[in-house]
Image: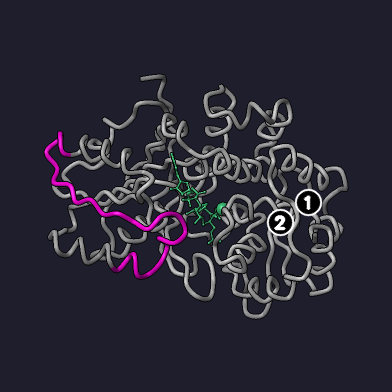
């Protein structure tokens, strides 16, 4: 086992994000007194879920294994209902718990299953993707998609702890690792410019799961998220900054029927949010251009089909940051200085889109 980093997340239900290698044996200690534990994972993560289940069983827990449809296709009410049926059949009580093993889709679904079962039981995400480690598994935002859009049903339900085992990144497809870096870049622009400097020094190293830069980037990004959500779990204020780039990103995901990786959509959304900030007279041209440059160097997309604009605009109107008919965007005034752009005109929104339109 290598060195372990524990990153505390504050708030009423404080917990640690544990980062290291060979962490499987730590799972049982995060759920004291849980006699029954449901381990949720999709097929590509079967081996990892086996290890986690074996560690729990070795500690005397009765494990219920539930296989999820993979990736975004698992974030549905049907999958959640199937999980609740299994918990009911296995007699899960309020002292029992859920463990979700996988990328952000599995941990979002698993967290929501736990949040709603008996109105809330303990859960632990075991993120296996970079994006899951730096973002989805941290902060207690859980949820599913609906026909109207992305993450429209869910709950704030902090986990009992988060296990980020860096060994799991070895099997992550490179395109998924790169997609996760989009959320890391987001943290760089909204709060931690050291992230941007590190990636710019050697973008190739940033995407090497075995290299030293990845762990540093993961820990820097987790610290940004932990700091924000520790002070504003329910997004009544500052937490909205974590949505930088997401208003357009979620619309792209819906228009693409969830076939795009979340991180890829976020990359386009970040460039759009920067252009919007610039065209609203807030962000300087150099910082705006820096978005496109760094994301391109990482191999992330920065453009989207021009003809999709009407659909995208209509979808953005059900974004959770909207208030009535007013859209609200997180924008940058300068590096690491965020603000809300409240009620931008359709002309301004369309003008900014020309900068990402392909
Ligand atoms: N709750 C939050 O705060 C939050 C934050 C960011 C993103 N999200 C959500 O997270 C989701 C995106 O997460 P993601 O990028 O991890 O995608 P994902 O969960 O869809 O996983 C992508 C693919 O990688 C595979 N995979 C994951 N880990 C693997 C591993 N170690 N080895 C081999 N294959 C592996 C998965 O099976 C899947 O096929 C989106 O639904 C997004 O909305 C939530
Ligand atoms: O944790 C948050 O808050 C975020 O906004 C992080 C985002 O990266 C993440 O994609 C989140 O799921 C988006 O939340 P939503 O409330 O817009 O669905
Ligand atoms: Zn995101």
Q: Is 79 contained in the magenta span?
A: yes
Horizontal relation, residue 248 to residue 347: left or right: left
**Colouring of the image:** one colour
Q: Residue 15: x percent and y percent?
A: 37, 42
Picture layout, residue 187 above or below residue 340: above
Horizontal relation, residue 264 to residue 337: left or right: left
Residue with the mark numbered 2: 339
Residue 74 seen from this side = yes
Comparing 69 with 215, the one in front is 69
Comparing 50 with 84, the one in front is 50
Q: Residue 267: x percent and y percent?
A: 67, 50
Residue contact at pointers 1 and 2, CB within 8 angstroms: yes
Q: Give the quadrant of the N terminus.
A: top left
Q: Element at badge 1?
A: strand
Horizontal relation, residue 61 to residue 234: left or right: left
Q: Give the quadrant of the C terminus.
A: bottom right
At x 37%, y 57%, the residue is 157
Which region shows up in magenta?
57-81
Horizontal relation, residue 125 to residue 266: left or right: left
Q: Is 9 contained in the magenta span?
A: no
| Residue 47 figure quarter | top left
Residue with the mark numbered 1: 333
At x 64%, y 55%, the residue is 265
The image shows a total of numbered marks equal to: 2
Label drawn at residue 163? none
């Amino acid at each position: 086992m290598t060195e372990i980093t524990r990153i505390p997340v504050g708030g009423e239900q404080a917990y640690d994000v544990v980062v290291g290698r060979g962490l499987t044996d730590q799972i049982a200690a995060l759920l004291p007194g849980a006699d029954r534990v449901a381990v949720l994972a999709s097929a590509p993560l079967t081996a990892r879920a086996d290890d986690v289940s074996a560690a729990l069983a070795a500690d005397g827990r009765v494990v219920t294994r539930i296989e999820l449809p993979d990736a975004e296709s698992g974030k549905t009410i049907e999958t959640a209902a199937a999980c609740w049926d299994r918990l009911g059949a296995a007699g899960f009580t309020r002292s029992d718990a859920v463990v979700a093993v996988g990328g952000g889709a599995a941990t979002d679904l698993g967290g929501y299953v736990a949040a709603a079962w008996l109105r809330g039981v303990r859960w632990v995400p075991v993120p296996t993707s970079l994006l899951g480690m730096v973002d989805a598994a941290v902060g207690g935002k859980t949820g599913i998609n609906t026909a109207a859009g992305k993450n429209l049903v869910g709950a704030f339900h902090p986990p009992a702890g988060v296990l980020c085992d860096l060994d799991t990144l070895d099997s992550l497809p490179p395109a998924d690792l790169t997609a996760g870096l989009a959320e890391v870049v987001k943290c760089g622009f909204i709060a931690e410019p050291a992230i941007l400097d590190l990636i710019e020094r050697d973008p190739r190293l940033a995407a090497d799961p075995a290299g030293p830069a990845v762990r540093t980037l993961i820990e820097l990004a987790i610290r940004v998220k932990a700091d924000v959500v520790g002070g504003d779990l329910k997004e009544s204020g500052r937490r909205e900054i974590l949505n930088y780039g997401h208003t357009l990103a979620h619309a792209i995901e819906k228009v693409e029927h969830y076939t795009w990786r979340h991180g890829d959509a976020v990359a386009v959304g970040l460039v759009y949010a920067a252009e919007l900030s610039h065209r609203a007279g807030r962000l300087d041209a150099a910082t705006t251009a820096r978005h496109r440059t760094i994301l391109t160097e990482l191999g992330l997309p920065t453009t989207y089909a021009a003809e999709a604009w009407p659909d995208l605009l209509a979808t953005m109107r059900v974004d959770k940051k909207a208030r009535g008919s007013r859209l609200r965007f997180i924008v940058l005034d300068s590096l690491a200085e965020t603000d809300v752009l409240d009620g931008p005109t359709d002309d301004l929104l369309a003008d900014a889109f020309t900068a990402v339109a392909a």
